[in-house]
Structures are given as structure tokens and as C-alpha cells.
Image: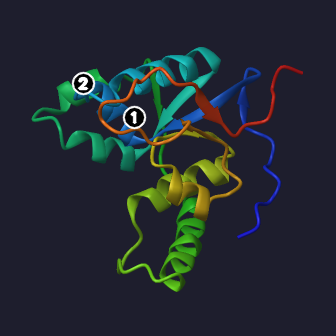
Amino acid sequence: MATEPRAPLSLVAGRPVTLVDSSVILDVVTEDPVWAGWSADALAQACDDGVLVINPIVYAEVSTGFDRIEDLDDAVPADDFRHEPLPYEAGFVASKAFLAYRRRGGQKRSPLPDFYIGAHAAVRRYRLLTRDVARYRTYFPTVALIAPERERPSGERQDQPLRTDQPDLSG
């Protein structure tokens, strides 16, 4: 699949907006022994860079680790994460990505949450902070990803640099 040129990123007060995938949040809140360090550093950097966003799908995926909504809200506070609805246009984009997935032999019968998350980032021109790179890169090639340099086995160091597929915003 040819990669289209990336659209300019959405900015708030001149700073990029980053949609945060549930995998990154879950790494931090569950203190994942392999990924917590990378994910916490990546979240901190994205927060320093601009605005963090989650949508109802990310919220739902993260909620599985909590018994009470109050505890979930403490983990993804509105002061740190802007809570956005899923844009209607993202439903259309997600369906097209899902059709491409099915044509490539995908077996799922309904769109996966990642399709909605990727579509949200695509239609709003947000960066996407994730460590689940393959599906997003394949089905949403115009989305700027913030992701680990590569997948790491459990014993490997966590301080490798981030790969960011984003344009230079320094001017």
C-alpha cells in the first residue's frame, strides 16, 4: 500500500494533539514490567508537546482494569486527557479500513476498536501514541505515529528512543 503524504497535524495553541491508545495507558496503570517505562516516558513527552486526547473506545478498553468508574477517572483524568466523542466521520473511515482488512484475509466480522481509534486520529489529523504499530501503519498510513522503535522481548531495556512519524513542528 503506497503511503500518502501526511496531512498537516491539528494544533491547539500551536501545539500538536495526540490521541492516546489504550495500550499505552494500560502499560502505565498496570505497571507492565516490559512497557511501563517506555509508555510513561512517551505519555510525559506527548503531554509536554501538546494536548492528550482519549475517546470512548479507549476509555472502555482501559475500564476493564477497574472495578469503579471513579478509579478509572483517576487514571485518565479530564485535567490530563481531553475526553472527546468519536467523530461520525471516523465511522466511515473505520468501515473503509475494515473492508481493506477483510479483503486482505482478516477474519473478524465487525470492525475492531483499533479501526475506530485510527480513524479518529486520521479524521482529526491527530498524532497517535501507541505501541500497536502494524495495524495503524497498514490501514491509516497518513496518521503520524508515536511508537517504540521496535518491539522488545521481555528482558530488553526500555530506554530506547521513540520513533515519531510526524513532521518537524519547530518551524
Examine the rendered structure and indicate whether residue 96 appears above or below residue 53: below
Say if 47 sits above or below 56 in the image: above
Confirm or deny contact between disc 2 and disc 1 (CB under 8 A).
no
Q: Secondary structure at mark 2?
A: loop
Dot 2: few (<14), some (14–19), or many (≥20) neighbours within 10 Å? Answer: some
Residue corresponding to mark 2 = 31
Q: Say which label, 2 or 1, has the lower sequence index.
A: 1
Identify the residue shown where x is 48% and y is 82%.
Answer: 102
Badge 1, how many Cα within 10 Å: few under 14, some, many 20+? many
How far separated are the C-alphas under marks 2 and 1? Answer: 11 Å
In which quarter of the view is residue 25 placed? top left
Q: Residue at x 47, y 46 (%)?
A: 85
- The residue at the point 37 percent across, 29 percent down is 156
For mark 1, give the secondary structure.
helix
Residue 149 is tagged as none
Q: Which mark is residue 24?
A: 1
The kind of residue tagged 1 is Val
